[in-house]
Image (spheres, grey):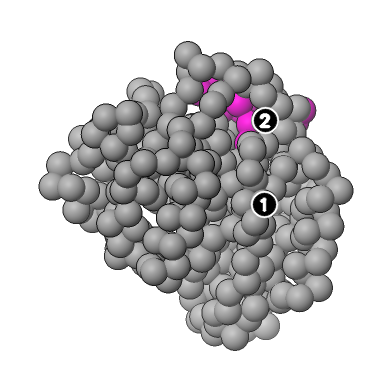
Amino acid sequence: MLAKIQILFILFVLFSSCDKKEIKENFKETVETILTDSVKSHDNDVITVIGVGDIMMGTTYPSSDLPPDDGRGLFEGVKEVLEDADFTMGNLEGPFLNSGGTPKECLTPERCYSFRVPERYGQYLNDAGFDYMNLANNHGFDMGPKGREATYKVLDENDIVYSGTTDQPTVTVEFKGLKVGIAGFAPNRGTMNINNKELAEETIKELKSECDLVFVFFHGGAEGAGAQNVPKRKEIFLEENRGDVYEFAHLVIDAGADLVIGSGPHVTRAVELYNDRFIAYSLGNFCTYGKFSLAGPQGIAPIIKVYMKKNGEFMKAEVTSVKQVRRGFPVIDESETALKTLKKLTKTDFGESSFKINGSEFLKPY
């Protein structure tokens, strides 16, 4: 209400001027400032959630390829950003396991990679401010049942919740006076199947009946520099059906989801606003040490901070651009390449009017 009164007053003052071009520019700038300040002034009524993409902090399989200083400082360049939210989520590529395990088998063995992350590295996620890890992806079962059980144990010990596997499909947490349910989906063995529409719809509806808010984290779509656009159809990659992520995201929101975050393509993809709910189709490679290609678009990624009302309605999203240096250390990218990429892809895939963009902020278009 206060914001509306302020806008009316500004209109009255500005239209007493005779410079119409100046009126238009000043009015646009003033309204955007008022709306942004309005979000900040109602912190108790606002939920903030940060999402990032793929995380693989180093591996000891098939040989040791770990970061310098045993990974300490991996997240130092982005920690301040990650901690600045009510809830922070990422996608964990590879199980925690100190030794042993049964490496997975793939449809295309020549392009098959298995990871095994030292269990002590779980503390790095906790220290960086992560609250949730999605385990629904093509690396969650890299070391078989032994790796899966060790991963659960490590995340539990570090107070990080998780979901997306067939034996841990969903999880609920409480923060800011709300009960929040989180589900993970992927097209891979041992995960909640992104291609099973009935399962997805039923899972989200059930979560919504028990929770105030529902978040969905999915891993799907084709991979690589040629997969930056959302094709709005089923995607096949390495002989696997990687899902129709556009249809999936809309389906889970129709079923009750309030936020949808995606990963899998290893590149940034567009964002969309659907039924006042925010969708990020891929947040790219965030912290992927050593074994991942970081060439071109695969080496940059956005950190997205979503502001929503307690009923799940989208308010705005803030983007922080990140790049990886030293083979996989994420740091703030002053050139804002990820932000520029995100703006371009979103306009291309969903139109000029999909969001009102103000600097690094994505606002409602209405």
Q: Quadrant of the C terminus?
A: bottom right
Give the amino acid type for the residue marked by disc 1 in the picture: Thr
Q: On the picture, is 92 further left or further right than 5?
A: left
Position in image of residue 72 (x %, y %): 19, 53
Seen from the viewer's position, the closer of residues 96 and 235 is 96
Residue plotted at (71% across, 76% down) = 212
Residue drawn at (67%, 24%) of the image: 240
Image position of 346 with respect to 233: above or below: below
Q: Do the residues bearing badges 1 and 2 touch, measured as CB atoms within 8 Å?
A: no
Query: From mark 1 to mark 2, how far is it between C-alphas?
Result: 17 Å
User: Can residue 266 be seen?
Assistant: yes
Please state which amino acid type lies under the numbered disc 2. Answer: Arg
Query: Circle 2 — which element?
Result: loop
Give residue 341's position: percent from left, percent from top: 48, 34
Between 313 and 355, the one lying in front of the other is 313
Which residue was labeled with disc 1? 166
Of all residues, the one furthest to the left in this rendering is 69
Specify the segment rendered in magenta: 220-233
Identified at 51% across, 65% down, the residue is: 161
Query: Mark 2 — residue?
Result: 242
* Closer-to-camera residue (37/326): 326
The x, y position of residue 26, in whole percent, is 51, 60
Q: Secondary structure at mark 1?
A: loop
- The quadrant in which residue 176 appears is bottom right
The mark lying in front, picked from 1 and 2, is 1
Question: Measuring 71% from the left and 27% from the top, which residue is drawn there?
Answer: 241
145 relative to 59, above or below: below
